[in-house]
Image: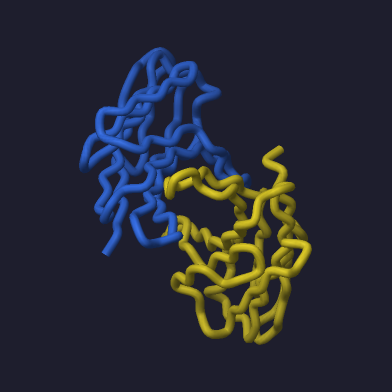
Amino acid sequence: EDQVTQSPEALRLQEGESSSLNCSYTVSGLRGLFWYRQDPGKGPEFLFTLYSAGEEKEKERLKATLTKKESFLHITAPKPEDSATYLCAALGSGTYKYIFGTGTRLKVLA
Amino acid sequence: DSGVTQTPKHLITATGQRVTLRCSPRSGDLSVYWYQQSLDQGLQFLIQYYNGEERAKGNILERFSAQQFPDLHSELNLSSLELGDSALYFCASSAPGFRGTGEKLFFGSGTQLSVL
């Protein structure tokens, strides 16, 4: 069964303290690994798509990487406005079901 | 603004009642997805429609049903509501994938359902 697991569940960082969020996935024939940011009471907002192992994408202080079993979201020198829940989702072959992890709640303290 | 519109934003109702949630996808998107988000379960896939046809089904209860209309808007109907149905319900849309790859989802702002 396709599965996505994220860790840690929650993370508190000081402003400027870099860290990484983990997303482990088990899907057959990955057709895409997606990262989203979700603010309280709002819908998830798309960040990145990764398609194959070794691929990397960057946007401002965020960088997403992909291996055959995991994806990482690296946050460099975070700011308080980066505080949010970060979700990853995987889409396997032969399906249209995007499987989401339960997310990492990130809090960046000033 | 994602371009996906969901109404209403909030719904408060009683157990046993029936409600309808509405979603308008982004212009040009043919796929509509419905997700349920609760505090303890995260985003749970309910159902997907593509150009009016049901394409994928997740853990959707028999009390729930959905459809996509010719103008591509979609409705999610929830009946015989129970306390446990209280959650955020999200609609998302996507463009067709290129060469079979998955495409990013654009989410609406959700409907907060409270069953009292």
Chain A: colour as depicted: blue
Quarter of the rendering occupied by the C terminus of chain B:
bottom right
Q: Looking at the picture, how far across and down is residue A14, in whole percent? A: 40, 19
Pick whichever, B94 or A13, lies toward us: B94
Residue B27 higher or lower than A110, as above or below: below
B36 with respect to B19 (left or right): left
Q: Quadrant of residue A27?
A: bottom left
Number of labels in the image equals 0
Residue that extends furthest to the front in the rendered view of this protein: B99
Q: Quadrant of residue A3?
A: bottom left
Protein image colouring: by chain
Q: Residue at x 45, y 60 (%)?
A: A96
Quarter of the rendering occupied by the N terminus of chain B:
top right
Q: Which chain is yellow?
A: B
B116 with respect to A32 (left or right): right
Q: Looking at the picture, how far across and down is residue A24, in whole percent? A: 26, 45
Pick whichever, B34 or B79, lies toward us: B34
Q: Residue at x 66, y 51 (%)?
A: B29
Q: Looking at the picture, how far across and down is residue A55, in whole percent? A: 31, 28
Q: Looking at the picture, how far across and down is residue B90, in whole percent? A: 60, 57
Q: Residue at x 36, y 38 (%)?
A: A51
Residue B29 higher or lower than B86, as above or below: above
